[in-house]
Image (cartoon, rainbow, N blue to C red):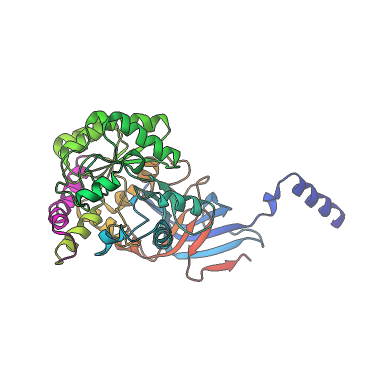
Amino acid sequence: MTRNFIPCLAAALLLGAPAAFAQKTYLHCGHLLDVRSGRLLAQQTVVVEKDRIVAVQAGYAAGGPQDKIVDLESRTVLPGLIDCHVHLESEFGKSSFSEQFTLNPADIAYRAQGYALTTLRAGFTTVRDCGGSGVNTALRKAVAQGLVPGPRIYSAGVALSATGGHMDGTDGLSDFMMEKLNPGPVAGVANGPDQCRQAVREQFKRGADLIKIASTGGVLDLSKNSSGPQYTEEEIRAVVETARDLGMRVACHAHGPEGIKRALRAGVSSIDHGSLLDDEGIALFKKSTAWYVPTLIAGKSVADSARKPGYFPAVVAIKAVSIGNQMQGTFGRAYKAGVRVAFGTDAGVFRHGQNAREFGYMTEAGMPALEAIRSATLNAAMLLDETANLGALEAGKLADVVALDGNPLQDITALMRPSFVMKAGVVYVTKRLWTESP
């Protein structure tokens, strides 16, 4: 027997086939939420090998002596959550405006690493970072290479807008500073179709996964108008067509109705915020392939902060109250009308790690708990074009798994308290759940 075993082992190693000896992890799930069917399945086993799910079986299966069992028998298990709108480089506070002039890229990177880990520990195993300084793309690389822990990141790099638009960092500065800095397409400020094409190509060159544009003004900038359109349909179309040629999708920040409609007609992949979406915009949404990413928690957060004296500059406070208080109502109308929703929060506008509060605001507005969870799993995976890898607990998909001490279909706030988080087969949150297989 020994004579036969040693040559067989040597042959397996030479042929590059150590799979027969690889350790598997068996997750014993008290209840597993099948997000596709909507059923809560009792006593299921998710089998993980390396970074993938290799099987989902009824009952509590066990492997060989080299395998591990994770006891989740008192917990509800669901796919890792996906947030389609975060900003990992920052976390807004009273000093945020002045920090634009004091923080170096290294300072931003150290902070971003912490925010990324906080997000992962909150159960969000994948995020779409919708704009920063470019540190977001570097962070994506570092996480992918295993240098730092964090969620899987799809980075927009530097977001794009027109001169005076939401992404123009010189809004509200002195004439001297505006002229001195004078940002252009390389810095994400682009005017006219040709500059818009150049700006897309710049972000592609720097490694971005998607393009983010602002077709309207925004709340947390020093311009006066948060809802007026700031790009023509021709300019947006130039962005979309150039991005499509390069294999990239376009996320569009938009609050006001005209900017939303121009972006939908031009073919963007998502409208993020959509605060003042009107009936004509809803009809356009339903004819398009675009997703609505509502970010309700951001609206609630900025409206609350605006009521604190001195928290925001006066011009920002006015916009925060006006826009923030309308977002949840708009979302409720859009969902009930049949607009497709993908989960997103704008984390960074509020504290990272609080992303799951969004689920509560969604259900308050009339979305059933199951549909809210689907927005952060199946739907979000579709928006990212990653349905082969993400969005459900199924064989062949990446082993992104979250376990909760409660049933989120009955208590949506359970999503705020994950007791177990696995990303690509690696455990980042656990409460002494490991046991060895008998």
Quadrant of image for the N terminus: bottom right
Q: State which quadrant residue 104 falls in.
A: bottom left
Q: Is residue 410 left or right of residue 222?
A: right
Q: Is residue 188 above or below residue 123?
A: above
Numbered marks: total: 0
Q: Main secondary structure of the magenta part?
A: helix
Up the image or down, 117 lies above or below 158; here it is: below
309 vs 51: above or below: below
Closest to the observer: 134 or 323?
134
Relative to 130, 110 lies left or right: right
Q: Is residue 16 left or right of residue 151?
A: right
Residue 263 seen by the camera: yes
Q: Between 291 and 397, which is closer to the camera in this rendering?
A: 291
Tell me what residue is drawn at x 67 percent, y 50 percent: 19
Q: Residue furthest right?
A: 3
**Horizontal and vertical percent position of residue 62:** 59, 59
Q: Position of residue 241 (x, y in %)?
A: 35, 29
| The C terminus - image quarter | bottom right
Viewer-proximal residue among 76 and 385: 385
Q: Which residues are magenta?
A: 310-339
Q: Residue 193 occupies which quadrant of the picture?
A: top left
**Would residue 399 be visible to someone looking at this image?**
no
Q: Position of residue 187 (x, y in %)?
A: 34, 43
Residue at the (17%, 55%) spot, across then down: 316
Magenta stretch: includes residue 221 = no
Where residue 60 sits in the image (x, y, percent)? 53, 59
Instruction: Indicate whether residue 338 is drawn in magenta.
Output: yes
